[in-house]
């Protein structure tokens, strides 16, 4: 986010071997956010971009990274200013979305998009008329305008334009407040004294050492070689540290490359890990993969989970009460589409955000649990934070609410709270049983042994109920026509 001091942060991540630094302006943001959430956040991208480029150049770091800028870029003129202030890449989001048919109703989280862009309603989706050619045409116009500006300035490429703030002039305005603005810091051309000229970007800057396969990835791929080659069962043991980020993602890519979206048979590849996993543990795990971690993990566990099974449990020798302690970080199961995840402990904030199909059991969550969830099932065997189920338009959550406090922590704009039906009880009990099998959870075992005394609440989205009723009606018609 563009803000004062962002250049110092950029220098730090460049030294840490980042590939790309993205500077986001203050006026962008997702259409699902209310206006009050995206106003007064950060500064214009021009200020953050200029500071970042200058700091990197003055510290001899500019050649290590590429700078990307975004935030309401719409025209070739915007791209030209971005390049002159130091950007290498440019992010377009809102404008191409509008070009493909979005009318900015800001109802992305309500499942009622009138033009069918952000909705699961088949009737509304049928109204979508956008095509890739609409976006391509828009970007051609942007490029055409940019080429005209480049020709007038005498540049043949964007690389030549990078950082040339001497080509930017301040307009003379008669307004008294405009005369008080000082752009000297923004329009100062950064020059590194040693070497004498600006450092060119190294073509290999996006292939740093961090992209080389880690020893842990090598061990996992070696252990799963027979599974990848012949589809036979394999088992691997590894030790993790928080430097092992996106553990399992490389394996998921190899499985998908060989076996496609169907993956392998269940539990074909079993990985038993121990230690503290870095961010994105089990990311994109595919069907046929079971990853069990004895320890804890950072944020984004199970990001993009795609059919695999994850289990995180405390070490066997631990003496603390797992259900009272956090075992995985924030934003777990972000964008998961299928698979299962079991956590013998609490999770951080935004658990299962944008989950669209994964099944999970966890023993407590922080604020904003099940936010923007569109599918899947979540069982919470403990407390939740505030704003639970905000923007939840699909899937079902079952929350253990023995203390009867859930009602005050749920965002009820899109969901109802209901008692469990006999079918729901069977579903929850089966999932908790599976949770205990994978994690040896004391909390889960206790809940099962005292099942009759427990009070679960079903969190059901309005739209999901309507979809389920519609599907049930369609199935009834099919059965009736079949008997006829």
Image: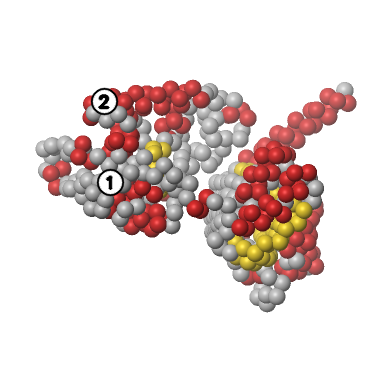
Q: Is residue 182 left or right of residue 138?
A: left
Nearest the eye: 85 or 103: 85
Secondary-structure class at tag 1 = loop
Q: Which mark is residue 337?
A: none
Q: Residues within 10 Å of mark 2 (few under 14, many from 20)?
A: few
Q: CA distance from mark 1 to mark 2?
A: 23 Å
Q: Residue furthest right?
A: 483
Which of the marked residues, 1 or 2, is nearer the chain's N terminus? 2
Quarter of the image where one finds residue 120: top right
Q: Secondary structure at mark 2?
A: helix
The residue drawn where x is 52% and y is 28% is 115
Tell which residue pokes out farthest to the bottom in this image. Answer: 319
User: Which residue is more in the foreground, 366 or 291?
Assistant: 291
Q: What percent of the width, then of the height, locates residue 33? A: 46, 45
Q: Residues within 10 Å of mark 1 (few under 14, many from 20)?
A: some
User: Residue at the location (40% across, 54% down)?
Assistant: 14
Front residue (pair 421, 238): 238
Query: Is residue 15 rendered to the left or right of residue 312?
Result: left
Q: Nearer the viewer, residue 406 or 346?
A: 346
Disc 2: which residue: 151
Task: Report the residue marked by disc 1.
Answer: 198
Q: Position of residue 336 (x, y in %)?
A: 62, 47
Q: Position of residue 271 (x, y in %)?
A: 71, 57
Marks 1 & 2, CB-CB < 8 Å contact: no
Residue at image location 79% in from the left, 51% down from the top: 233
Q: Is residue 393 visible?
A: yes
> Is 462 drawn above or below residue 478 in the view shown?
below
């Amino acid at each position: 986010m563009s803000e004062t001091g962002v250049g110092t942060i950029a220098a730090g991540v460049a030294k840490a071997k980042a590939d790309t630094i993205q500077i986001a302006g203050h006026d962008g943001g997702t259409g699902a956010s209310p206006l009050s959430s995206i106003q007064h956040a950060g500064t214009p991208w021009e200020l953050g971009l200029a500071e970042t480029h200058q700091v990197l150049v003055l510290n001899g770091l500019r050649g290590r990274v590429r700078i990307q800028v975004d935030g309401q870029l719409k025209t070739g003129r915007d791209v030209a200013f971005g390049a002159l202030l130091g950007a290498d890449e440019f992010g377009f989001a809102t404008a191409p979305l509008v070009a493909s048919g979005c009318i900015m109703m800001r109802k992305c989280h309500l499942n009622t998009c009138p033009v069918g862009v952000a909705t699961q309603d088949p009737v509304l989706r049928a109204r979508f008329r956008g095509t890739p050619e609409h976006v391509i045409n828009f970007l051609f116009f942007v490029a055409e305008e940019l080429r005209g500006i480049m020709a007038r300035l005498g540049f043949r490429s964007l690389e030549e334009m990078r950082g040339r703030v001497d080509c930017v002039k301040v307009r003379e305005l008669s307004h008294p407040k405009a005369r008080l603005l000082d752009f000297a810091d923004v329009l100062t051309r950064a020059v590194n004294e040693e070497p004498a000229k600006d450092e060119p970007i190294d073509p290999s800057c996006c292939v740093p050492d961090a992209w080389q396969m880690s020893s842990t990835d090598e061990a996992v791929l070696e252990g799963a070689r027979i599974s990848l080659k012949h589809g036979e069962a394999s088992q691997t043991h590894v030790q993790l540290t928080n430097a092992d980020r996106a553990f399992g993602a490389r394996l998921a890519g190899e499985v998908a490359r060989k076996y496609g979206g169907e993956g392998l048979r269940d539990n074909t590849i079993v990985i038993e890990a121990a230690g503290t996993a870095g961010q994105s543990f089990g990311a994109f795990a595919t069907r046929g993969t079971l990853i069990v971690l004895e320890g804890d993990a950072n944020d984004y566990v199970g990001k993009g989970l795609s059919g695999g099974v994850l289990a995180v449990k405390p070490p066997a020798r631990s003496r603390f009460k797992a259900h009272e302690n956090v075992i995985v970080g924030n934003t777990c199961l972000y964008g998961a589409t299928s698979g299962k995840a079991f956590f013998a402990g609490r999770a951080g904030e935004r658990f299962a955000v944008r989950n669209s199909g994964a099944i999970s059991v966890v023993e407590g969550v922080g604020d904003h649990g099940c936010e923007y969830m569109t599918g899947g099932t979540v069982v919470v065997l403990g407390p939740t934070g505030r704003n639970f189920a905000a923007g939840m338009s699909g899937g079902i959550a079952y929350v253990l609410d023995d203390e009867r406090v859930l009602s005050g922590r749920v965002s009820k704009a899109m969901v109802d709270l209901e008692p469990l039906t006999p079918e729901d009880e069977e579903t929850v009990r089966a999932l908790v049983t599976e949770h205990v099998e994978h994690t040896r959870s004391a909390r889960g075992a206790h809940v099962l042994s005292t099942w009759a005394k427990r009070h679960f609440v079903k969190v059901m989205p309005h739209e999901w109920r309507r979809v389920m009723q519609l599907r049930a009606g369609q199935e009834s018609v099919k059965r009736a026509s079949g008997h006829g």
